[in-house]
Amino acid sequence: MAPILFFIGSFGAMAVWLFFIRPYVVIHGQGNKTGANMGVAIWVDWQSCGEIAAAENDAKGRRIYRAFGAFQLIAALGFLLLFF
């Protein structure tokens, strides 16, 4: 069960970022390249998505933001269950 949760959480979060968060942030003009590793770029885009959604009171942006967070929690839970 733990490997399945880890897999779903990891790849679900990557898919949400690639197909929803990144385009959402770029459309709103905040798609900056950080020059760092991919993890930092994903985190910056996720935070930007939340800020844009809050500033514009955008329900779609909030759903995307929360879905990514949920997948991250699932991945973390799966990772922890691998060891306990």
Image (cartoon, helix red, strand yellow):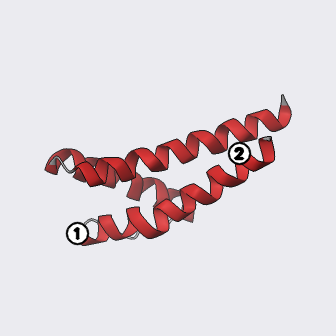
Question: What residue appears at the point 65 percent right and 45 percent down from the top-left corner?
Answer: 75
Residue to which mark 1 is pinned: 29
User: Where is residue 39 drawn, in percent x and y?
Assistant: 55, 58
56 in relation to 83, above or below: below
User: Where is residue 5 drawn, in percent x and y?
Assistant: 71, 45
> 67 or 31: which is nearer to us?
67
> 32 or 79: which is nearer to us?
79
Q: Is residue 63 left or right of residue 70?
A: left
Residue to which mark 2 is pinned: 5
Question: What residue appears at the point 35 percent right and 48 percent down from the top-left corner?
Answer: 63
Any part of residue 34 in sight: no
Please tell me whether mark 1 sits on a helix, a strand or a loop.
loop
* Mark 2 / mark 1, whichever is N-terminal: 2
Q: Which mark is residue 51?
A: none
Question: What residue appears at the point 47 percent right and 62 percent down from the top-left corner?
Answer: 17
Q: Is residue 21 left or right of residue 53?
A: right
Q: Quadrant of residue 28?
A: bottom left
View extreme (top): residue: 84
Inspect the image, locate mark 1, and give the three-letter code of the amino acid beneath it.
Answer: Gly
View extreme (left): residue: 56
Instruction: Please state, as top left, top right, bottom left or bottom right, where the C terminus lies in the image.
Output: top right
> 38 or 74: which is nearer to us?
74
Q: Is residue 73 left or right of residue 35?
A: right
Question: What residue appears at the point 23 percent right and 53 percent down from the top-left corner?
Answer: 52
Instruction: Please state, as top left, top right, bottom left or bottom right, where the N terminus lies in the image.
Output: top right
> 10 or 60: which is nearer to us?
60
84 in relation to 58, above or below: above
User: Where is residue 72 drawn, in percent x and y?
Assistant: 56, 45
Any part of residue 28 in sight: yes
Mark 2 or mark 1, whichever is nearer to me: 2
